[in-house]
Image: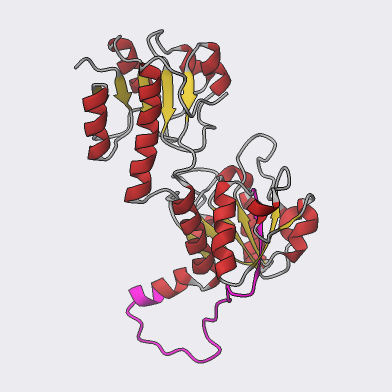
């Protein structure tokens, strides 16, 4: 079968098998292609009409300008699409799609994992066990914080934010939220809306970020915002590293304004700020919100569904404006 799809990022084998069966595929299974390698592969194989990438491959306007005319779709296997200049692609008549919905549950699970790990000093406890745990602790030693009974503030009450709120409520946590607009009551499920995020923060013992990253939100969680939280609060971020001013976050963690942080995303990845490595009150994961077998499979199939739409001459179901 003539290859019509380029997979520029490694995928699990069942996805490659499906792509080969339905479209023919050229797949990079050993390593992720660079942007330059991706463009060269598309230019060198005129039959290729679609390219599947991950969020690690950045298609800015300059890169999109180099794409050959045979390319009709950039399918990113991610919810976020900040790594693609969607307007530049659409100006060239190229669809851009993402993979919404299917990442919700896994990302919400990880957010809860980070909350519990941060509050219960998971990093420090793990280090004690790694050292062999031969010391005894008294009743006043190595105390963490309860999750039950806390008040959780959520910035960004989309699908993932709502899934986190649902999980937190099961722990007896009160949920507040700030969103661009108030949700319908059936979606709020008891969460309390604040139109002014600064008015919400003084009531939040835990703050969880689920907002999109854009120019307006870049560094918006700064010293001024962190100072509004009650002293000894915790911050969790599974959304975008760009939301946080990391200098201010480090200062808040060092001063005790924040008791802990749970972080899955950073401003620079994978070359994250190593000051966080030195802070034992930071519980970290390496951008793994969707990293489950089931979710990555669902993401891949969603991306391939969009490829199938375009190759059949249809507008893809997840086309971005």
Q: Residue furthest front?
A: 186
Residue located at (39% from left, 35% from top): 302
Residue 57, percent from left and from top: 42, 30
Quadrant in the picture for residue 296 = top left
Q: Is residue 46 a member of the stretch shown in magenta?
A: no
Tell me which secondary structure the magenta stretch mostly adopts. Answer: loop
Is residue 52 in view? yes
Quadrant in the picture for residue 16 = top left
Q: Is residue 105 above or below residue 42?
A: below
Query: Which residues make up the magenta segment?
Result: 127-156
Q: Nearer the viewer, residue 75 or 28?
A: 75
Image quarter in which the N terminus is found: top left
Q: Is residue 222 above or below residue 165?
A: above
Tell me: 211 left or right of 14.
Answer: right
Image quarter in which the C terminus is found: top right
Q: Nearer the viewer, residue 116 or 49?
A: 49
Is residue 53 in view? no
Residue located at (37% from left, 24% from top): 307
Residue 92, percent from left and from top: 51, 11
Q: Nearer the viewer, residue 57 or 299?
A: 299
């Amino acid at each position: 079968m003539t290859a019509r799809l380029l997979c520029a990022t490694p995928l699990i084998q069942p996805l490659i098998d499906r792509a080969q069966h339905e479209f023919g595929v050229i797949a990079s299974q050993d390593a992720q292609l660079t942007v330059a390698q991706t463009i060269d592969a598309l230019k060198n194989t005129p039959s290729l009409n679609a390219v599947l990438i991950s969020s690690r491959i950045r298609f800015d306007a300059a890169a999109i300008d180099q794409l050959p005319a045979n390319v009709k779709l950039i399918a990113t296997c991610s919810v976020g699409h900040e790594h693609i200049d969607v307007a530049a692609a659409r100006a060239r008549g190229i669809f851009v799609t993402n993979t919404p919905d299917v990442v919700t549950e896994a990302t919400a699970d990880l957010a809860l994992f980070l909350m519990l790990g941060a509050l219960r000093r998971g990093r420090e406890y793990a280090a004690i066990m790694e050292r062999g745990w031969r010391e005894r602790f008294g009743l006043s030693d190595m105390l963490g914080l309860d999750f039950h009974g806390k008040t959780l503030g959520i910035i960004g009450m989309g699908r993932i934010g709502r899934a986190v709120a649902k999980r937190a409520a099961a722990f007896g946590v009160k949920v507040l939220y700030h969103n661009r607009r108030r949700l319908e009551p059936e979606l709020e499920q008891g969460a309390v809306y604040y139109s002014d995020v600064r008015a919400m923060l003084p009531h939040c013992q835990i703050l969880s970020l689920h907002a999109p990253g854009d120019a307006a939100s870049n560094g918006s969680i700064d010293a001024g915002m962190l100072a509004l939280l009650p002293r000894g609060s915790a911050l969790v971020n599974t959304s975008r590293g760009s939301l946080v001013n990391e200098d201010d976050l480090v200062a808040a963690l060092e001063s005790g304004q924040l008791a802990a942080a749970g972080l899955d995303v950073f401003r620079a990845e994978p070359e994250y700020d190593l000051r966080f490595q030195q802070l034992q009150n930071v519980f970290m994961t390496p951008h793994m919100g969707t990293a489950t077998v089931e979710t990555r499979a669902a993401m891949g199939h969603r991306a391939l569904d969009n490829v199938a739409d375009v190759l059949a001459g249809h507008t893809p179901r997840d086309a971005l404006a």
